[in-house]
Amino acid sequence: MFLIINSFIYRTVVMLIPHPNWLMGLAIIFIYFIVIIPLTLYGTEKVLKYAISKGKALTLLLMATPVLIISLYFYNEYREKSLDQVISYDEDDIHALVFHEGHEEEWRTDEREHADKLNEFLSQYQVKRVRHRDWDSDVSNENGFRITIYSDGRPILASVYEERMLDVGTGPYKVVNGPIDIEWVENFIEENR
């Protein structure tokens, strides 16, 4: 139970920090070892002693709850979802959509209408998350595009190909109802440049 709680806390803390640097990482590790681990050890010990004194049913419930929460988390992460849920942004908070070709910026826009059209296009496709080890990094023979979405929150960086996509924040996905119409994206860029 202790390991489950600590792993969840560590992942949550790391995901909340928008742009960690080495100093921030060192501070997180320091706080983690000096504050979080001792507090969770103390809390776990007190809860288990209380549960054991009250009976086996409460003990079983307390031990099963973190397992259930983590199971639901992984179920949600690996279920089929629409591409606009994975590349999720609020059109009102967009500062810029940037499409890339190679290492260069191909087109940049901050118009809400463009964000709406892109979101509508992405919503047509269903994706399912895959493990990182199943991702083949050689994309040289695949058609696709790279996009960076700047908004009030963290920037979203994604590489989208006909049969798969990589979201830098969450990981790789396979397209379930593809292929993605990359030609539509190319025309969208050309029409609005």
Image (cartoon, rainbow, N blue to C red):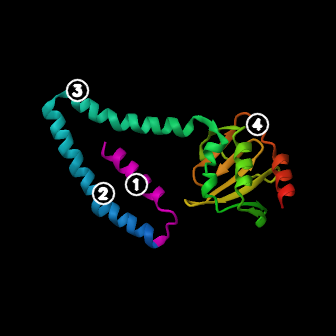
State left or right for residue 38 relative to residue 173.
left
- Calculate the distance from the C-alpha at mark 2 to the C-alpha at mark 4: 44 Å
Q: Are marks 1 and 2 in contact (CB under 8 Å)?
A: yes
Amino acid type, label 4? Gly
Where does the magenta region start and end? 1-22
Between the C-alphas of marks 3 and 4, the distance is 48 Å
Residue farthest toward the left in the current orientation of the protein? 53
User: Which element carries disc 1, helix, strand or loop?
Assistant: helix
**Quadrant of the image occupied by residue 134:** top right
Residue 36 has which mark?
2
Is tag 4's residue or tag 1's residue first in the polypeptide sequence? Answer: 1
Q: Residue at x 82, y 52 (%)?
A: 188
Residue tagged 3: 57
Q: Residues within 10 Å of mark 1 (few under 14, many from 20)?
A: some
In magenta segment, residue 154? no
Q: Is residue 121 above or below residue 114?
A: above
- Residue 66: image location, x then y, percent: 35, 38
Q: Residue furthest bottom?
A: 23
Q: Nearer the viewer, residue 161 or 122?
A: 122
Identify the residue under disc 1.
Answer: 10
